[in-house]
Amino acid sequence: MIDVERWAEIRRMHRVERLSIREIHRRTGLHRKTIRRALAGDAPPHYRRSARSSKLDPFKDEIERLLRSDPRIPGKRVRELLEELGYAGSKTVLDDYLRDIRPRFAPRRTYQRTVYRPAELLQFDLFEPRQELPVGYGQTRRGYVVTCALGYSRAGAGTLVFSKEAPDLLFGMARCLWRLGALPETVVWDREGAIHSGDGRPTEAFAAFCGQLALGWHILEPADPESKGLLERRHRFMRSNFEPGRSFASPEHYQLELDAWNERVDRRTHRGIRAVPAERLVEERRRMRALPARPPDSDRRFVVRVPQQPYLRFETNDYSLEPRLAGRRVEVRISQRAIIASALDSGELAARHRRSFAHGRTLTAPEHQQALDALRGGRRREPEVEIRPLARYDRLIPA
């Protein structure tokens, strides 16, 4: 068989130079039948390998039967069943054949490219840092990041919280919205326990939050991560670009680093939209609604009676209360930064503490300790003990 270059040269010599087959034979030394075949065919020559039988051929009907009964049957199980029937071929040959034939029985899901209108949609999700974060007193704690991304501009934000409870997630949502600087039409969440109450319905706390901001909501179907692919991709980038090479001294340090990273990322060209998210965000804000004067209140609130040991326990920590209010009821308000208690009957401040995310601590305010000492009439003074010189013992115990 001649190669393509020789085939093309023969056709040029005959069609362009008008040479006869005899002359082409004399110049090239090729057999005249080879020359005639080259002139007769319009397609260039190519090598064809004869089909070889495979050890898998006798079992193809059985494979199709298995796939008709269960299109998602694992390849390993197919191989086990075929080996019982005498199959002795390789795993690779079977896997390649299954990869080619399985779509006939279980068509793959296809996706259309989604185009978002400005201000239309804001996706929310949770990202869990790989390492626990330092929270003081030599302790570390698992944290979560409430993340978000706008569909049109792809601009994003994130807020560190330490639980998946509604007050923390709603605080994270509010902070993300205030970082973006405006309100979208709809927020999207998956079926997170504090967001979804069942059957696609929101929890009361989530519905109240959206109602105060006049936000629409959309809760995704179960096991459908593709519906919030914007955040799935951003989470992978956080895992590969934000976390490596960084260490954090406190939750506040983590939040500062995360905010700076989000701002830096949004100033880069986004490959999906072929634009800079920060620039698109300026355009998108013109279509979004303005933020209210203050975010919705997501603090925890409850009423307790000040015990005789005037301490309030929250998340395994004990916070001191005003001891003079023992027996009276106080309203406790717990935000992400502080724990504040006020007497219900008089409005008197019962406690103000910085919230600790460590565990098992007892936090006593100096003024509360002073009040305890005053109520007990002062601490008992320790008896004075004479300190004798060592020379006296030397005289009593001769050497």
Image: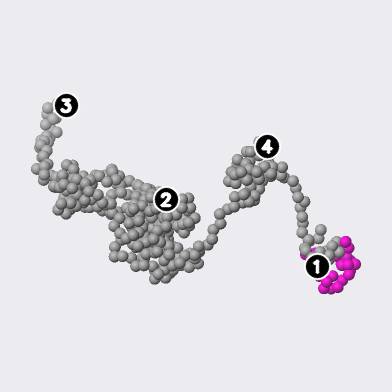
Residue, x 29% and y 63% (percent of image)? 294
Please tell me whether mark 3 sits on a helix, a strand or a loop. Answer: loop
- Separation (CA) of disc 4 from disc 3: 100 Å
Q: Position of residue 343 (x, y in %)?
A: 17, 51
Whether residue 28 is in magenta: the answer is yes
Instruction: Specify which label sits upstream in the sequence, 1 or 2.
Output: 1
What residue is shown with label 3? Answer: 399
What residue is shown with label 2? Answer: 199
Of tags 2 and 3, the one toward the viewer is: 2
What residue is shown with label 1? Answer: 9
- Report if the CB atoms under discs 1 and 4 are less than 8 Å apart: no
Q: Position of residue 181 (x, y in %)?
A: 36, 65
Q: Is residue 175 above or below residue 384?
A: below
Whether residue 296 is in magenta: the answer is no
Of tags 1 and 2, the one toward the viewer is: 2
Please tell me whether mark 2 sits on a helix, a strand or a loop. Answer: loop
